[in-house]
Image (cartoon, rainbow, N blue to C red):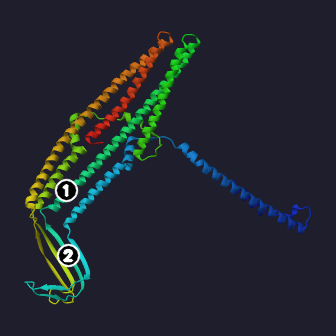
Amino acid sequence: MKLGLIAEARLEYRKPFHVSRLPFHDSSLIHKCERTRRFTAITLYLQIDHTMKALTKTLLIIMILAGPVAFSQEAGPRVLTLQHAFELAEQNSAQLKIAAQNTELAHQKIDIAKLGHLPNISSAINYGYLSNSQIWDPSFGKHITAHVPHNLTQFSVQASETIFRGGEIANNIKKASLEEQVALLNQEKNGEDIKFLVAAKYLDIYKLINQRQVFGNNTKLAQERLKNILHLQKQGLVTNNDVLRTQLIISDLELAIRKTDDNINIQTQQLNVVLGLGLNEQLIPDTTLLSLPFKNVTINQLMATSYVNNKDLKTAAKEIEIAKTNLKVIKADRYPEISLFTSNNFQRPYTNSIPAQDIYYNIWLAGVSVKYNISSIYQSPRKVKAGKIQVEQSLARETLQKQNVELSVNAAFIKYKEAKDELTTYTDDLKSAEENYRIVEKKYFNQLALLTDIIDAANTKIEAELKVSTAQINIVYAHYQLQKSIGLL
């Protein structure tokens, strides 16, 4: 629009002025009209440009102010699959970040243990005051003071490398490597715990949403029933007591909906904290979760899988290896330590002559060093005995852990079958409750049943619907609990 008006103004400015349009030919008047026409065109152009700039600013301000409102209207609850929830939890869980740091720390300990194969190198620079030398004869009867140059300057370098220590260095590296594997297993175990926590919260929200739907449907049903009762009251077929009791039922159902909404918000906020999302972000569970096909497996298959994949059993096996390796490290103390060494010393003054000479001298040496800890003769047996006890303790812990895993898998399998059996039973009960409600309601409106009968039938129907909803969720929960017990979550 702006470009069109500006183009029109420019066209008016550039349009040629014809003298024949004037009733008479006056050159001064012609020039005056020409100047007037050009001034009018320029003024029109500036006014249009100013108006369009003001309009642009106004539109920009309106867009800025309306932007957050429009965004907040578009942003709403989003569907979150359980697998996506697992991924968010792994990315944002503080517990998993700590476990990852423990794994990284264990890896650094391997590098530190490998440093035992490298030579030790040190250097020193000394500068100071050297006193005179005091000299006595063997009987301490004669004493003299020998002059020594007082300016001491010394630079030295030493290096040594261990070539044998009873396998201590190699076993320390192996031990650190096993500890890293244990840290990695603990990280995976923490990941399974976080996933199971997320699954539990996710399914709790799903269960509450289903409960709210049950309450909502029954509220509509009760409101429709109230309309029919009011119609019967106008005909004088029922008393006001029936109306009041039906209104109380509707009020209780509406209160149950509000409480369920509050519980949904609480559970959603707790799940958002675990997933690292905004506290007030609304999530909608994936409705296809209840229709996922779960394979039928036997208890023997589950046990065999748990022996291979359960993280606690893997950790117990690694701890046995660590205890045995630690026993080898303890036994290495009974062997001598053999190392190569070399050193170089550059010093002033030279003190190996009398009198001492104020000169620089350099000396180096190299050789083989053999050290043996004599106290290990009586210390090592006690240390070895303690190491053997640790091995036995690790073996006993593995046996205990295996029993716990077997019990956990067996209990999870029983609960899974129980959840499936409950769903079958409650589904049949729901069909009976719905048919019973239909019959009682028909009898009531035909004056063949009391209001208490229809209230009991409605309550039975609501209870049956809630049981079916809960049983559907419990099957999924039992499935994930079973997967966690065998180490495949």
* Type of amino acid at the residue the image marks with label 2: Gln
> Residue shown at 32%/26% (left/top)?
422
User: 196 left or right of 373?
Assistant: right
Does 417 sit left or right of 79 as displayed? Answer: left
Mark 1: which amino acid?
Lys
Location of residue 170 (image quadrant): bottom left
Residue 175 numbered tag:
1
Label pair 2/1, CB-CB below 8 angstroms: no
Nearest to the observer: residue 46 or residue 148: 148
Dividing the picture into quadrants, the one containing residue 211 is top left
Work out whether residue 293 can be spotted.
no
Q: Residue at x 28, y 42 (%)?
A: 488
Residue 11 x/y as whole percent: 75, 60
Check the image and report above or below for 224 versus 364: above
Give x and y (percent) for residue 154: 23, 82
Residue 158 disc label: 2
Is label 2 in a helix, a strand or a loop? strand
Image check: 325 left or right of 258? Answer: left
Label 1 crowd bin: few (<14), some (14–19), many (20+), radius 10 Å: many
Residue 371 in the image: state x and y as whole percent.
11, 68
Earlier residue among tags 2 and 1 = 2
Q: Mark 1 falls on what kind of element?
A: helix
Q: Residue at x 69, y 55 (%)?
A: 54
